[in-house]
Amino acid sequence: MRFVVAALTALVLSSSCAKAEGQNHGTHPGTAPTATTPTTPTPSTPPAVVPPGPLGVVLTEFEAIRADLAKDSAAGLAQSLERLKPAVEALTAAKHPQAQALATGIAALTASLPKDGAAIEVKAVRVAYGELARAVVAVIAADPALQAGRFLYECPMARGYKRWVELKPRMENPYMGSRMLECGSAIVAWGVEG
């Protein structure tokens, strides 16, 4: 993450310096300013591919749950589970290699919901989310096409599984939320361990 910030800062500074140099040193009094070739911006990270069908549903809902937890909320969890369950059933029927692990994660999240109408305990949801995160990381690690536009992070302070996936290079830790939103580190090589 520091590398990305440093690279972007260098790009902005070099662009600003080039403009200032052209304005101050590139022209002489009485001569017309010369045209400069616009700099080509560094290509940004491509957007994450969302595959069609049930796997796309899993990845989309996983990100929605992560974003809620980063905001210390689990308000959308029940609705996400309603969409996740049939998607994982379809993956199971199609014999997807991670279908059982995804089903285990869904079961853990379902068990974290209160049965008696009580308020959702975000702490319990975060631990259960880790089980789904383990399966999602395995799915993405096995398919390089899914890795583009996705970022893998790890939080040393998380209870249970410590890794998660995001769609942007700025960390928003679902395990710690607002207490420590940027706690953790980027993982370069995709892998499930953690």
Image (cartoon, rainbow, N blue to C red):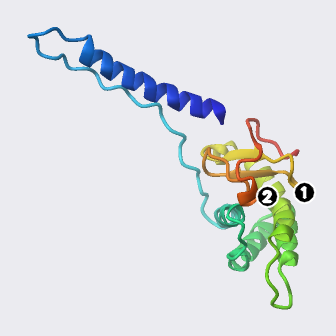
Q: Residues within 10 Å of mark 2 (few under 14, many from 20)?
A: many
| Mark 1 secondary-structure assignment | loop
Write down the quadrant of residue 83 in the picture: bottom right
Give the residue displayed 47% in from the left and 27% down from the top. Answer: 11
Residue sitting at x 61%, y 58%: 51
Query: Badges 2 and 1: C-beta atoms under 8 Å apart?
Result: yes
Q: How many marks?
A: 2
Mark 1 highlights which residue? Answer: 159
> Would you place residue 55 above or below residue 77 in this image?
above
Question: Mark 1 belongs to which amino acid?
Answer: Arg
User: Tag 2, which secondary structure?
Assistant: loop
Above/below status of 191 relative to 133 = above
Q: Residue furthest right?
A: 160
Query: Residue reaching furthest top?
Result: 28
Q: Nearer the viewer, residue 25 or 137?
A: 25
Q: Which residue is mark 2?
A: 175
